[in-house]
Image (spheres, rainbow, N blue to C red):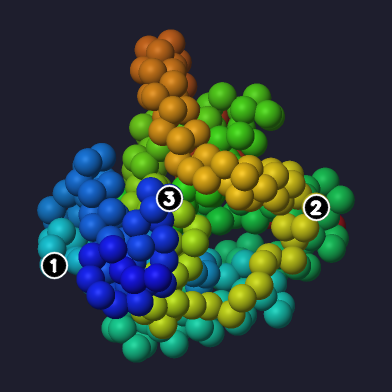
Amino acid sequence: MKCSFCNNNAIYKDIDGNYYCKDHFIKYFEEKTINTIEKYKLIKSGDRIGVGVSGGKDSNALLFFLNKYKEYFNIEVFGIHIDEGIKGYRDKDTEKLLEISKKYNLNVKIYRFTEYFNIRLDEAVKISKEYKSCTICGVWRRWLMWKAAKDLNLDKFATAHNLNDEVQTILMNIFEGNLKDLLKEGPYVGIVEEDFIPRIKPFYFNTEKENLLYSILNNLEPPFGECPFIVGEFRDIIRSKLYKLEDKYPGFHRNFLRNILEIIYKAKIDYKMKNNIKLRKCKICGYPTTREICRSCEIKLKINNI
């Protein structure tokens, strides 16, 4: 099949039936991302932006993209890599990320669980009966992103969540009744609590396949593999069901997200008017929290005292 925009062979077909060669796909992908950034006002001139970069396909692509367009947007870009400490998984991603950062002159800072929490994630999971792997990882990763934002004086934190990720998260929050988390969905997190910087998602309307192809075409692809702790988790179940729906009804993810966002935006306005939760600082680390001791310090204290 030929590209819809030139005579070259096509390598990708989008949901609307357009075919793209390599060059036109990269142009399509980057223009689509720029459109999301400009439409939702995700970036302003002079911003210092931290990019949460795991070393996976999506985050590698986002760091590469923002670095490529940093002069266009007039921004400073910092890659923030969190090494949870999962042998045979995270070490490979870290190695690939460092290789890419050297090749493309990317500014990457590494924060390690062992440095701040005195233990690797795989070790913490083995000894903890109270907390699941994703709970420990999520809480500690959020704490380290907050720490990085303060260390580097960041204005915004960019994550590489894609269209597929967001639909999964929205459905999980609906099924679990997590209204507050549901209201944080969108390209720009609209509920920003005290002492937290805004989070932006430039790849919000890009599909997982598009991110992967962009990574491959720019030689950014990481070692393939999934976190060993994801098997059997709720997200894995939701993801597999959604893949089947997308195969049967092409465009399902895009159409669902467009419609649900309208409902979420209206709910955000109502939530802001009715709720005004004041945060205090954790007495141990200073992290903004509604509790005396934040969850990060609570988990750290319990696990290190087992």
61 relative to 235 in the view: left or right:
left
Tell me if label 3 and label 1 are in contact, CB under 8 Å: no
The image quadrant where one finds the C terminus is: bottom right
Q: Earlier in the sequence, mark 1 or mark 2?
A: 1
Residue placed most toward the observer, 232 or 6: 6
- Do we see residue 302 in this rendering? no
Residue 134 lies, in percent from the top left, at: 69, 52
Residue 8 lies, in percent from the top left, at: 29, 77
Separation (CA) of disc 3 from disc 1: 31 Å
Residue depicted at 43% across the width and 50% down the height:
15
**Residue labelled with disc 3:** 15
Q: Earlier in the sequence, mark 2 or mark 3?
A: 3
Disc number at residue 298?
none
Q: Earlier in the sequence, mark 3 or mark 1?
A: 3
Tell me if label 1 and label 2 are in contact, CB under 8 Å: no
Disc number at residue 232?
2
